[in-house]
Structure formats: C-alpha cells, structure tokens
Amino acid sequence: MTTQTDTVEADFVVVGAGSAGCAVAARLSEDPATRVVLLEAGGEDKNRWIHIPLGFGKTFADPSVNWCYETEPDPGAAERRVFWPRGKVLGGSSSINGMVYIRGQAEDFDHWRQLGNTGWSFEDVLPYFRRSEHQMRGADSFHGTGGPLCVSDVAQHPICEAFIKSAIELGFPRNDDFNGAAQDGVGYHQTTTRNGRRCSTAVGYLRPAMQRANLRVVTEALTEKILIEGRRAIGVSFRRDGRLCTALAAREVVLCGGAVNSPQLLMLSGIGPQPHLAEFGIPFVHHLPGVGQSLQDHYSAPIKLRCKLPVTVNDVMLSNTRKLKAGLEYYMFRRGPLSMISSPAALFARTRPELASPDVKISISPFSAERPQDGLHRFSGFTSIAYQLRPESRGEIKLKSPDPFDAPAVHPNYLATETDRRTIVAGLKLIRQILAHPHLQSFVEAEFQPGPAVASDEELLDYARRRGGTVYHPTSTCKMGSDPAGRGRCRAAGARDRGAARRRRLDHADRGVRQYQRRDDHDRREGCRHGAPAGRPDGRITARRSDPQGDRSDCGRAE
C-alpha cells in the first residue's frame, strides 16, 4: 500500500452515497456554482440483480454490494449473532432493500415536534414527502408527482388476497394507502420501483445529477477520518486504490454513513464518548457521549407455512420451465415473479385497545426460506412475520479497533423490555389468528415453523429469541433533541449539532422513502453536517430543506 496523497477540493464533501447521500449530493449540486464531492466506499450499482426487484435475495449476502455486518452475541436473540446487511454500493441500502414504501405515522412526527424538534411535525415534513415523490396513482393531499422517487403499486397475489380478506373479516379495516390519512388496517404496500425496476436513490436522485459538471462521485473510497482544525471540520481523509487521499470542504462536510457507519466515523475522528475513545488511543476532539448510543431496530419473528397450492415463488424456482417463463415475462413486460418485492401486503394493528395508533406490523410474503442467503425452501411455502413498530429496547454501536477497515461492534439489545417481549408474542398470536381463517386455510398445508407444539406465551417468546431477526431498520445512533446540558445528543433541534462548531446533522435512513413507526426524539438520518471554516459562507441546508430519503432499510426480507 502506497502513501501517495491526492487532494480534491469542493464546497461540500458528502460521505456515503447511500439513501441520504445520493439525495443530498443531488440537491446540493442543483446550484451550478456549488462544487460537490460524493464519496462512497462501495462501487457503482452495475450488478443486474440490484435493479430486478426479486434480486434482493441475490444481494442479501453479496459482499460486493453489502457490508454483511453481524451483531455481537445478543442476549435477547438467545446469544446469537444476527446478520445485518447494509448497502455498500451507490444507493446504499436503497439498492438492496425490499422496496416497500412506508413513511411512518403522523403521530410519531408530531411527537418529535412535541419533544422540541422544531420542523419535524407531520405538517412540516409532508411537503417534502410530496416533493420527493412521483406517485403513479397521481397527486393528492398526501402524495406528489414529478419527484425523483417513483412510487408504484404491486401486483395482486392469491395468498396476499386471502390474507387481506381474512384480516378484514376479523374486523380490521381495508387500507389502500398506508402513507395516507391513517396507517391502521390491511392492504397492499406500494413500492419504490419504476416500470418493474428498482428506483433506488442512486437511480432516482444521483444518476440524473451525475451529468452536472459540479458534482464529482468517487467510488471505492473508504473515508477514514474527519479532518478538524480547532473545532471545525475542514474535510476528510479517505483511501482509494491504496492511496491516502484528502477531500477538503470550503463549506461543509456531510456525513451520510447511516446508523452504523456515521457513529463509527465520528468516533474514529475523536468525536464521541471520551472513555471509549481512550480505550483505543484515539486523539480526543470532543466528548459527545450520545454518539453510537440509543440504537433501535425492528426485531421480527416469522411463522413459516407449507402451501397446498403451487402458487408461491418457491414453486417457480423449483421448475426450470416456470423459471424460463418468469424470465421471459420480466424481460418482455417487466412483470411476473421477478418484479415481486419483499412483502406485497401487510396489516398494521394495535395489540392493546388503549393504544392511540398501531404498534405492530404483520406482513405476508409468497415465499419461504430458512435464511434468505441460503435460498428458498425446496417446497411450496410462504411466510408471515410480525414486528413491533416502536421498540423500547436500546442498544449501541461501539468500536472494535481504531482501524477504519474493521467493522464496528453492534449491540442491538433486542427484547430487553417487557413491552417489547409482550408485543412480539402478541404479533405471533395475531398471525395465527389470521392464518386460521378459512380464506387462508385453503392455502395452508401446515405450519412448520415454529409448529403447533409451540403454543404458550413463554414458548412463543423463546421461539422469537431463537429464530427471530432484524428487518433491517437500525436508527438513532446520532440522535437529535433538545438536551440543554448537551448530554447524549449529537444534534440539537433545528438541525444544529452540539460540539464541534457549526456541525449539523442531516443524514439517512428513512425520514422519507421508508420512515418507520417509532423512535423518540431523533432524526432517522444518522449523520452529522460539519461547519465551514471562519470567513466562509455557511451554506446551511437544514434537514427540512433536503428531500427526505430512506435507507432500509432494509435488505432481503427488508422493508
């Protein structure tokens, strides 16, 4: 490895070309007088399976486009290491996720505003959701057209139809728009696809912007450190092709590394909990104990079924003739099994009558697998999963070493509270209630996981611990809020960070495309914006001004 140093200069340096980074770089570069450099550790999104919707199963554990993280052994998951895919490619996790378009509940945004986060009520953010969207159904009071992110309907499927009818006859309302007036009810998802192909943030935002002379995109560039003079960030160092390079920012550095990589980079740069940094001899810049803390994730548990009828994706993949037909149908018409997303239909429900809004999601997928990376089962099967929308459990991201090439330590702390444990059990019981309805019984040959022998609440909880996993929605490790003492928060309300001068948060993960249903006072865009040197224009673009984009979240079985 050489020590040759290259330097690039720009007004804005954006770190991470994922769900947020692509949107941020595209928006900043709309001003032709503004120079923008976008750094991405992964490569270009040339893998064909990225763009074919069902291809999320192919990229789920592909290290060429995926960080393929694992958690530390987690007590809530029976001391297992849980696989955490995250996108390592242009578009980030929006290039490998399940393409479900969910914004979140209006009540959550309003709650954030009540906690002091000015500009984050649902009324505040709705115009930006509408602005980001090209809704194939047309514009209305909740949806927009002409935006970079294409939102489409999914095709109907007989298992999903039976699921929807069963839930309706059990008393749940039909809901054809989970991103409309209310989220309660059962229906089909919408999806971030355009004409049968994935519409990632790389496709929707970045690709058109790359025609601009003032935007430079550098792939295969791993950012190692934020460069700080005094208390101001002036750029970053990154490594590409064995060379140590520098990107200097005349105005701001914008971290868009997500819930895992943004806190890792901050800590590697000396910003974070001082005692933890001292363990690795990292020079201390600013004691900010909230960096890496407050980690939240959606933990799910599945029920897997053998199907009586050959209508699942498993059946297609077991037949060479049907695979050939599916390939031709997709190639010619952009439809059929290859155009399927991770979970076409879902139910948002309340497990307790006193709740003001849904606290659990039940989704249905017309396929089954032991693990997505192992391929589909060799028999006809389908899956329903349950997960709590507002987990109370909190984990953390920590460093394993001062080497930026080493993955950080992920401690999710799943199912650590009684509410979380009670809700996952209630979700599994609700799945069984729906599956027992005659509409779905015409498809169910047998429940093979966990199986009817697992019946009590204690047995269901034990099963959830042993066989559950993430639905790929980590968040909140650089949370925002209004903490007068500066404890725990990376960013104060109003988009201004604490600590190093004029450092502001903006980043990723689902304020828009897939903003999910819980979180306390935080901004799901895990990252920080760092301010300009003295005498330079600030160039402030707040979180409200940027187009909201999602990460997903979320790969393989992900949203």
Image: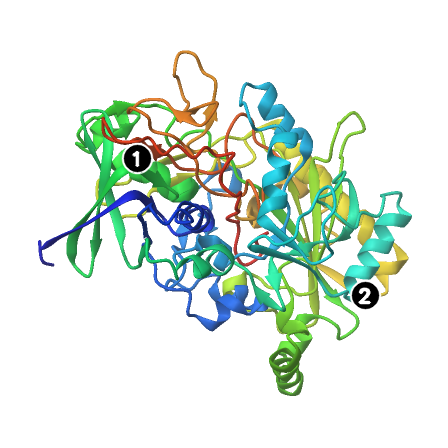
Identify the residue at image location x=54%, y=62%: 372
Q: Position of residue 391 (x, y in %)?
A: 59, 33
Direction from residue 251 to residue 347 in the image, left or right = right
Q: How many marks?
A: 2
Task: Determine the image quadrant of residue 316.
Answer: bottom right
Left or right of 118 in this view: 87: left
Q: Are marks 2 and 1 in contact (CB under 8 Å)?
A: no
- Given residues 402 and 120, the one toward you in this image is 120
Q: Which mark is residue 443?
A: 2
Q: Earlier in the sequence, mark 2 or mark 1?
A: 1
Q: Camera-side residue: 236 or 430? A: 236
Q: Is residue 285 left or right of residue 455?
A: left
Q: Nearer the viewer, residue 219 or 453?
A: 219
Say if residue 517 shows up in the picture.
no
Question: Helix, strand or loop at disc 2?
Answer: loop
531 relative position to 165: left or right? left
Give the amino acid at mark 1.
Leu
Image quarter where the N terminus lies is bottom left
